[in-house]
Image (tube, grey):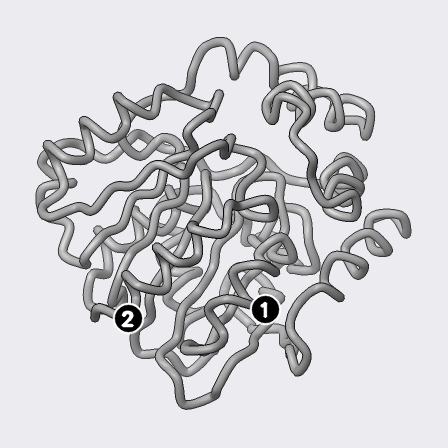
């Protein structure tokens, strides 16, 4: 990884609350880098970033949730960040992701936890909640992708050049398009651009959960959708979630787009999450 990426990563990480600690948890698929803050005896919550993103972007959530929870945020193995894959043990399947999360929770001494995921991180969180419901207390899906509907074809088409041959300029151009030029933290913008310098592997992909699978989802679930998301049609996402997930709670985040989250989340995002987690 480049020095420019590491410098941008550390600049955004400095926005986390005072007293944040950092650790590397050994799992069968490599060392997972985790940031933690909040009271040690508070209920735990684990934050999972979207594809191509890092754990550092959760600084707003960490500041808000650490008042009442022990907050952990992990860099996904194989994605940008400080996690280090185990040679010869890549994540290839959804079952691999389940074993990775099992090992991560065990390494953090968490018999169970609330899970909050954004985008691809939400897909991972949902798949894990379906496979290991006893280890997920509550589930928060932040503008989740490939969970209830597919991507917008226009979104995929615009993302394709960046996905095939990422460069900082292409990352910046795509972010500008999806966020419609929304004002964002310039340090986070720079980190997002610099993720193009990071040597990633092909992410684990898989089918969307079926209606039958979703109907068996056990943890209480909160679905937060970005009003101006270009990743998908949020009305379709909300409609399918309400039909398939028992008791799901849904809210729309005004003015938000898929990629203004989580670093540029509107204030009410964390109000919704904090209230939902407190209702356990």
| Sequence-first disc among 1 and 2 | 1
Left or right, 108 with reference to 2:
left
Residue closer to the observer: 35 or 179: 179
Q: Residue 113, percent across and down?
A: 33, 70
Q: Which residue is mark 2?
A: 278
What number is the disc on residue 34?
1
- Vertical relation: 85 (above or below) 102: above
Question: Where, by quadrant of the figure, is residue 20 drawn?
Answer: bottom right
The image shows residue 73, relative to residue 227, as above or below, that is: below
Picture disc at residue 49: none
Residue placed most toward the observer, 31 or 148: 148
Q: Residue placed farthest to the bottom in the image?
A: 41
Q: Quadrant of the C terminus?
A: bottom left
Query: Which element is circle 2 on?
Result: helix
Asked which quadrant contains residue 135, the reply is bottom left
Residue for point 47% across, 88% down: 40
Are there few (<14), some (14-19), or many (20+) residues within 10 Å of tag 2? few
Residue 6 point in image, percent of width and height: 83, 55
Rendered position, 217 above or below 164: below
Q: Could you tell me which residue is drawn at 9 percent across and 46 percent down?
A: 246
Q: In x, y percent, where is residue 98?
A: 35, 56
In this rendering, would 277 be left or right of 263?
A: left
Q: Is residue 33 left or right of residue 223?
A: right
Dot 1, how many residues are within 10 Å of its Cα: few (below 14), some (14-19), or many (20+)?
Answer: many
Q: Is residue 37 left or right of residue 174?
A: left
Look at 43% across and 35% down and name the residue there.
254
Q: Is residue 146 above or below residue 30?
A: above
Secondary element under disc 1, as helix, strand or loop, is strand
């Amino acid at each position: 990884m480049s020095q420019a990426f590491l410098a941008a990563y550390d600049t955004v990480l400095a926005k986390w609350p005072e007293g944040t600690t950092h650790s590397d948890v050994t799992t069968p698929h490599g060392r997972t880098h985790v940031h933690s803050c909040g009271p040690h005896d508070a209920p735990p919550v684990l934050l999972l970033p979207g594809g191509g993103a890092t754990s550092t972007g959760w600084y707003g959530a960490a500041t808000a949730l650490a008042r009442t929870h022990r907050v952990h945020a992990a860099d996904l193995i194989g994605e940008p960040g400080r996690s280090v894959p185990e040679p010869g043990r890549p994540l290839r399947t959804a079952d691999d992701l389940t074993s990775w999360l099992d090992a991560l929770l065990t390494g953090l001494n968490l018999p169970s936890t609330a899970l909050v995921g954004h985008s691809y991180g939400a897909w991972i969180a949902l798949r894990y909640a379906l496979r290991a419901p006893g280890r997920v207390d509550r589930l928060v899906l932040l503008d989740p992708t490939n969970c209830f509907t597919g991507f917008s074809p226009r979104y995929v088409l615009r993302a394709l050049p960046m996905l095939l041959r990422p460069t900082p300029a292409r990352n910046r151009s795509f972010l500008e398009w999806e966020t419609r030029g929304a004002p964002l933290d310039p340090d986070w913008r720079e980190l997002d651009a610099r993720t193009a310098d990071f040597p990633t592997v092909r992410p684990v992909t898989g089918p969307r959960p079926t209606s039958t699978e979703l109907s068996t989802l056990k943890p209480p679930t909160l679905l937060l959708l970005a009003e101006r998301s270009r990743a998908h049609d949020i009305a379709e996402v909300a409609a399918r979630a309400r039909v398939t997930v028992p008791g799901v709670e849904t809210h729309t985040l005004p003015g938000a787009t898929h990629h203004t989250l989580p670093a540029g989340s509107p204030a009410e995002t964390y109000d919704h999450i904090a209230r939902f987690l407190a209702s356990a």
